[in-house]
């Protein structure tokens, strides 16, 4: 009914329908399926969090005007990790960065 609805009326109406047997009961899967669903949801959440953190890491480089992602194909590979570790450790020279990039492969 348009304009004459609220949650209390809806819940009473659904309850009346249930008492009359017009609303089927909910499906409750077995415990193994519930556990599998929980692990799947947790894994999806972890993958999402990991992707989010990687994006934040890459964005930090962009904000600092370091375009490492245009030089390496994988920002989290061996070469990029070696360059990143060196950048964090102090003020690098260009010769050292090239040496790390060429020898990390």
Image: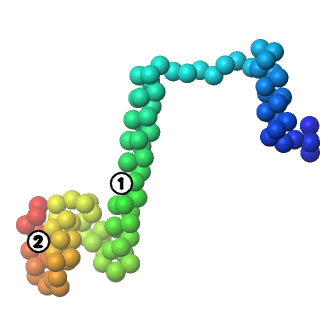
Q: Which one is earlier in the sequence, the residue at label 2 or at label 1?
A: 1
Along the viewing direction, whichever of 97 and 12 lies nearer the viewer: 12
User: Mark 1 Cα within 10 Å, few/some/many (few <14, many 20+)?
Assistant: few
Along the viewing direction, whichever of 83 and 67 lies nearer the viewer: 83
Q: Is residue 89 left or right of residue 74?
A: left
Along the viewing direction, whichever of 65 and 30 lies nearer the viewer: 30
Residue tagged 1: 50
Q: Is residue 5 left or right of residue 104?
A: right
Residue furthest top in the image? 21
Q: What's the image's color scheme?
A: rainbow
Residue tagged 2: 100
Task: Label 1, secondary structure: give it.
Answer: helix
User: Mark 2 Cα within 10 Å, few/some/many (few <14, many 20+)?
Assistant: some
Q: Is residue 39 visible?
A: yes
Q: Residue, x 33% and y 74% (percent of image)?
A: 61
Q: Is residue 7 left or right of residue 90?
A: right
Residue 83 rendering spot, x and y as whole percentages: 18, 71
Image quadrant assignment for residue 41:
top left
Residue 40 rendering spot, x and y as whole percentages: 41, 36
Image quadrant assignment for residue 66:
bottom left
Q: Residue, x 79% and y 17% (percent of image)?
A: 19
Could you tell me which quadrant the N terminus lies in? top right
Residue 47 rendering spot, x and y as whole percentages: 38, 48
When the figure is inspected, residue 46 is found, relative to residue 73, above or below; the finding is above
Image quadrant assignment for residue 70:
bottom left
Q: Residue, x 25% and y 60% (percent of image)?
A: 76
């Amino acid at each position: 009914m348009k304009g004459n609805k609220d949650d209390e009326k809806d819940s009473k109406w659904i309850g009346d329908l249930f008492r009359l047997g017009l609303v089927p009961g909910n499906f409750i899967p077995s415990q193994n399926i519930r556990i599998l669903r929980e692990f799947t949801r947790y894994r999806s959440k972890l993958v999402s969090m990991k992707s989010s953190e990687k994006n934040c890491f890459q964005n930090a480089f962009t904000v600092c005007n370091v375009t490492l992602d245009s030089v390496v194909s994988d920002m989290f590979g061996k070469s990029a990790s070696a360059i990143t570790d060196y950048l964090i450790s102090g003020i690098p020279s260009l010769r050292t960065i090239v040496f790390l990039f060429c020898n990390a492969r």
